[in-house]
Image: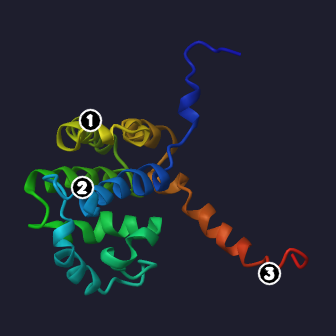
Amino acid sequence: MFVPGFNIIEGIAIDYLYCVLLGIVKMLMSLWFNKTHSSELWNISKKLELIDKPLLNISPPNCISRAPRSILKDFAHWKASEFRSFLFFYGVFCLWKVLLDEYFQHFILLVEVVWLLNQKSISSQSIEKAGNLLRHFCLLVQALYGDRCKTFNLHCLLHLPECVQNIGPLWCCSCFWYKDYNGKLRKLFHEAQKI
């Protein structure tokens, strides 16, 4: 039944695990590191060793569940938590002076937005700032990377501030907890006969 003034979208969360981490962050990193795009300005596949060496030398605190893995050898097997760690902790350090400045600054916009929307307590000013930064980020995507990056995940980014305002921080409604429990459930199955 249609109720005037009620928006059904308000009750639906955009999951930042799939939209941001496994969507946008993975897409950007794939563009930067994949050799098939080596002729593009933003591609740094020839400089991967400059990123891998400092990345592998990082000793993260125990609040980070996975130690950094090589981009050269293990990128295809990275998990969402590794993309999260790269976004929040390793990316700025590893990409600085390796990625061209306009692409680096563009990445920093995403880092700041996700950081703002992932806090335990988020002010309305932070939500407004995140919305402005996201619009700027999304507008620059086409100019910097072309039409290939105009994806549904990119569109969903624009709705993150509203989602956070209606439901809460990104971390409170992400699929991280569900994926963790799926792993625990999977360990209960040993054979088809002995569940």
Residue 93 seen in the figure: no
Rendered view: 113 above or below 1: below
Instruction: Identify the residue position indicated by label 2 in the image.
Output: 37
Q: Nearer the viewer, mark 1 or mark 2?
A: 2
SS at mark 1 in the image: helix
Instruction: Identify the residue position indicated by label 3 in the image.
Output: 190
Left or right: 111 in relation to 67: left
Q: How many residues crowd around disc 1 within 10 Å: few (fewer than 14), some, or many (20 or more)?
A: few
Question: Which quadrant holds residue 47?
Answer: bottom left
Counting from the top left corner in percent of width and height, residue 36 is at 27, 58
Name the residue at 21% across, 81% down: 54
N-terminal-most mark, 1 or 2: 2
Number of numbered tags placed on the structure image: 3
Instruction: Identify the residue position indicated by label 1 in the image.
Output: 135
Name the residue at 28% across, 36% down: 147
Name the residue at 8% across, 56% down: 101
- Given the image, on which type of amino acid does mark 1 rest? Arg
Counting from the top left corner in percent of width and height, residue 154 is at 37, 40
- Given the image, on which type of amino acid does mark 3 rest? His
In front: 119, or 62?
62
Counting from the top left corner in percent of width and height, residue 33 is at 26, 64
In front: 33, or 24?
33
**Gap between marks 2 and 3, in whole Å?**
43 Å
Rendered view: 110 above or below 141: below
- Given the image, on which type of amino acid does mark 2 rest? His
